[in-house]
Image (spheres, rainbow, N blue to C red):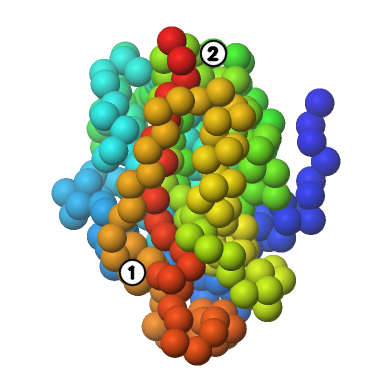
Amino acid sequence: MTTKPHPTHLFVQEAYGAIARIGGGCGPQSSCCGGGRVEEVAQGVGYSVAELATLPEGVNLGLSCGNPTAMAELKAGEVVLDLGSGAGMDAFLAAQRVGPEGRVHGVDMTRDMIARARQNAAEFKRRTGLNNVVFHHGQIEEIPLPDASIDVVLSNCVLNLSPDQDSVWQEIARVLRPGGRVSISDMVLLRPIPEALQADVRALVGCIAGAALVDDLKAMVAAAGLIELTLTPKEGAVQAMIPTDDPMAAHLLGLLPEGTGPEDYIASLIIAARKPA
């Protein structure tokens, strides 16, 4: 049974569908992680030039807030799931690490992103010889994969876009094999943001308004039955993601109290945990 789309789903699908169609960036009329400076943002949040050079052109859409693949310690032969896989950036990096005996599943609810990712997969295969990535259309609140089928769950600046993050964590636990682990990069609130900013739905696609408070995140992970949670901040990521010439970003930052900046409210964290063996 497919979950009925939430208004937030529809809003995010429209915004990210437009990004997929234009090939990256967020333009002056939309707000998303990074704001369109794709190479600058990717390096600022933790991707190396060497990693980026292995990817097909157009895979990096400037939507990242960290590099979860680098922290996941992926091993050859593992089965990986990338939630909100977009154009395939982290999926293709993971595919190189798990090798031909491994498998990477990408899940995204935006059909334009899935179409773009599948096109990129053909170029990825031509470049690397690897044919170990498959992309699924679906919602991360209802992952279209079997129970206990995944070794590692990745995600990059996506969980904050979900209107039901509790369900996402429950689904993560469901699809993980016993002993499986999580390496997720996401925006997390250090303290509540001003009501004016929280109420501005445009901030959702800027990875701000939908972010969970740290204590709420800890509670969701624990309720899902995952253990050994660690939260590692990516220094400089928030600053790297904020566009300096985007009217939408200027609008959102203008809603913050005088004397405060986004780093006082929000952080980019690598969220690591595992399912008990």
Report the residue at 49% width, 55% height from top.
Answer: 188
User: Could one spot residue 140 in this view of the protein?
Assistant: no
Q: Position of residue 186 (x, y in %)?
A: 46, 50
User: Could one spot residue 168 in this view of the protein?
Assistant: yes
Q: Is residue 240 above or below residue 244?
A: above
**Cα–Cα gap, marks 2 and 1:** 36 Å
* Quarter occupied by residue 136: top right
Q: Earlier in the sequence, mark 2 or mark 1?
A: 2
Report the residue at 32% width, 38% height from top.
Answer: 69
Q: Is residue 60 above or below residue 178?
A: below
Amino acid type indicated by mark 1: Ala
Compared across the picture, whether 65 is left or right of 256 comes to left
Q: Nearer the viewer, residue 149 or 239?
A: 239
> What's the mark number on residue 40?
none
Q: Quadrant of the N terminus?
A: top right
Q: Position of residue 258 (x, y in %)?
A: 50, 89
Q: Is residue 141 above or below residue 270?
A: above
Q: Is residue 40 above or below residue 177?
A: below
* Quarter occupied by residue 8: bottom right
Q: Position of residue 263 (x, y in %)?
A: 40, 70
Compared across the picture, whether 38 is left or right of 25 comes to left
Circle 2 sits on which residue? 148
Extreme residue in the left direction: 50
Amino acid type indicated by mark 2: Ala
- Label 1 secondary element: helix
Q: Nearer the viewer, residue 268 or 175?
A: 268
Mark 1 Cα shell of 10 Å, populated few (<14), some (14-19), many (≥20):
many
Report the residue at 71% width, 60% height from top.
Answer: 11
Q: Position of residue 227 (x, y in %)?
A: 45, 25
- Label 2 secondary element: loop
Circle 1 sits on which residue? 240
